[in-house]
Image: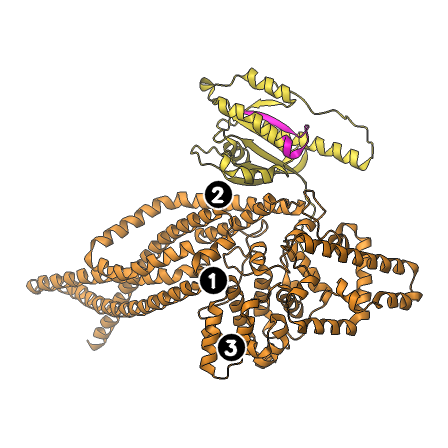
Amino acid sequence: MDFDSPEVMKDFPGLYSSEKKKGNDNDYNDECEKTTKKDMLIGKRKEKKDKKDKDKGYAALEGESSDEASTCKSKKSKAFKFTKSKDKEKEKHKDKQESSKKNPPKKSEKPHKVRKGFGPSKHYVGDCTDLADALPIFGVDIEEACTRGRCHDGISIPLPVRECVDYIEATGLTFEGVYKVSGPKNKVSQIRKIYNNRQVVRLNEYDVPTATSLLKMFLRDLPEPIFTNELLIRFEEAGAILNYNTREKHLKTLIESLPNLNRLLLGWLIVHLHNVTLKEHINKMNRQALSQALNHTFHISSRLLQALILHQEVLFPNLAIIKYYPPLESESALPDDPVIIEKELSKLESLLSQIHWEMQNGHFSKTREEHLWEVQRVTTELKRKLKKFAKTENTSQQTSQDIKQQSEEKEAEKVLEEPVQVPKLEEATTVNVEVEVKNIELTYDKKIDPESVTESEETANSSDAIKEQRTDSEEEYSDSELSSTDSELLEDVFCQYFDEKIVTLKIKNTLLKDLIESLTENINQEKKEIEDHQKKISNLMRCLPLKPAYRRCLKDPNSFNEVQTLLVRENHMLQIKKLHLVRQVMEQKEQCIDLQAKLKYAMKDNKDLKIF
Amino acid sequence: MSKRPAVQPALHKVIMVGSGGVGKSALTLQFMYDEFVEDYEPTKADSYRKKILLDGEEVQIDILDTAGQEDYAAIRDNYFRSGEGFLCIFSITEDESFQATQEFREQILRVKNDDNIPFLLVGNKSDLDEKRKVTFQEAQDRANKWGVPYVETSAKTRENVDKVFYDLMREIRARKKDENKTSNGRGKDKNKKKKLKCVIL
């Protein structure tokens, strides 16, 4: 990919000299630029060597990564590409150099790359060159990529991968030859630079091939393949097994022995690729074609990749791609819903702690500092909103708690509530400990949805309980009415009145009975769902041993506490919300039944009239 | 690809420093929203932006309200670097907070590496004069020593609240003009005075 890497010079010693000859008819300036470029490349090579000796921590940068990333296949194909489009690229490069000279503030890649290898400097260097050089997101191992290119919703997928997948899922699935057609290299490396600079990338300003090429570049640049060097061969062996079930079993055990971050990243990608194949009738990329287009990227055989896509449902159960919504920016409209505010706040806090961490490690830049102020400003504004909300909510919270207490006193409620509260508690604890699990388990996508699962369970159960009591009393009431009417039947005036009462009550009675039936049905469904969720949770717990993964994405111990307190608060708010909803549901149902009863009675009246 | 807002008025970055509970947030909120918050809740870091008219010129002020507690010192330091002016606040009812200003001053000078950074010493809670522990003269002497103005404020009564922010912004603005002149080399000979005025109430 990196056409100006020193290795190219090695492979093609005459590359730049021949260019000179060819460029004879060009003006003098161009030649000058070429020589400087050559010098720079030589300089860069030296620096790279120095750097290799100095530290291997950041060793994996650009061209270098491909040496280490094993499998010479990809390297060969690279070299081949260069001979093909050599001239074009040279021209492009010239343009780039010229434009960079014209626009000094852009500074372009040259001075940027030359600085590589030096320790972090403590001074501003124009844009965030410092951060991009010292802590790049591309070309580093998965753990570092996840920390540096952090997704602030707690899912440990490197940001470039997440955003590319989101973009391709949104627009690329119907693109013919998706992943096969590659995007313009200059644009791809431009986006990589933006990512490394921690700036916002708007992929929809590019196109699908650019996004797929960027994703491929990220994966290819990984110093170690996702399958890890140790397990790679065993994966290949498993992929070659002919028997469907044995292959699936072997692959499953291997995937379970991958490090958490690798497994999550791999699962994410494979599920995504599976989604691509689901649209093969439009994008013309079936499993085979897709595997052939991507096996080099993954450093595996296309057979293995095909097998992974084929078995994805068993290999990565319950893994759904969740769209990433980056933290709010100062221009974006702020949410009003406290639940969403809390969620956004936790993202912002994560971003803040990331920026602080970078700065504490000596990486400053003017833009990053401005970003810090901006993020802090949005955070403050949201916190103010939340405080205001909490104040108004304090009063209504008390009333809703009263209602809960009242209802809890009754036995029926208790019986019904118990089976619900057990899973609820379990879920709460998992949520607190493991954000990742929470996000996979509960679809984050629809913003309020994550809670709706438990919410609806509770709603159904408690509303049913209340309903039952109400019908009980209703029945008693109608019974007593009936007995009293017996004695006073003779009085015509009352007769009509009681008749009306009784009939409406009877209608109500049947309606309520129907309601109970449907609600109990709902409860049973919800119970089943609870069981499913419990299974999923236990599965996930087995797949992702909690603590290590968590520690990785939150190096700062403070942020753990923050996240914990935030989540606890969030849960509290959700409880309040839930109670409100329950009440609303009840009120509406009651009104509805009242009206229905009246309606039926009225209709009956009409019929009577006709008869008379 | 970072989006820049179009043409915006000049932006001055102000940082509030001082020990915990001296009223940094109270001053900020009073200035921003004309509200006085009675209940104390320690700040970690908060940032605000406001558009104001400074001597007929529309400017924006960014206020960063920092933590007084040492727990968040690391976070605070990251902000110091980008601050253009500082309000160093203590409570006139608490001598310790006054003593702490010395350390804050040193820390700021260390980070900014600039003795003339726009800076105001602010004695807050002037409405609680009966509980006063730090005399006006004492604070004024320290301010003189540093070559900075000293102002007493009350976030509760709003006394001098606008004044400290506006005075500081004027200093920042003057400072920026000076810097532009020296860096551009265009010697527009305006009043080149060094801003080291004392404010006596």
Compared to residue B29, the image places residue A556 above or below, namely below
Mark 3 highlights which residue?
A238
The residue lying at 48 percent from left, 47 percent from top is A557
Which quadrant of the rendered structure holds the N terminus of chain B?
A: bottom right
- Foreground mark, 3 or 1, reads 3
Amino acid type of the residue tagged 1 in the rendering? Lys
Between discs 3 and 2, the one toward the N terminus: 3
Q: Secondary structure at mark 3?
A: helix
Chain ID, orange in image? A
Range drawn in magenta:
B109-123
Q: Residue furthest left?
A: A487
Q: Residue furthest bottom?
A: A242
Q: Secondary structure at mark 1?
A: loop
For disc 2, the chain is A
- Location of residue A46 in the rendering, given as x and y in whole percent from the top left corner: 76, 56
Mark 2 highlights which residue?
A384
Answer yes or no: are tags 1 and 2 on the same subunit.
yes
For disc 3, the chain is A
Between discs 3 and 1, the one toward the N terminus: 3
Circles 1, 2 touching at the beta carbon (< 8 Å): no
- Location of residue A209 in the rendering, given as x and y in whole percent from the top left corner: 66, 70
Mark 1 highlights which residue?
A446
Amino acid type of the residue tagged 3 in the rendering? Ala
Chain ID, yellow in image? B
Tell me if I can see residue A288 in this picture.
Answer: yes
For disc 1, the chain is A
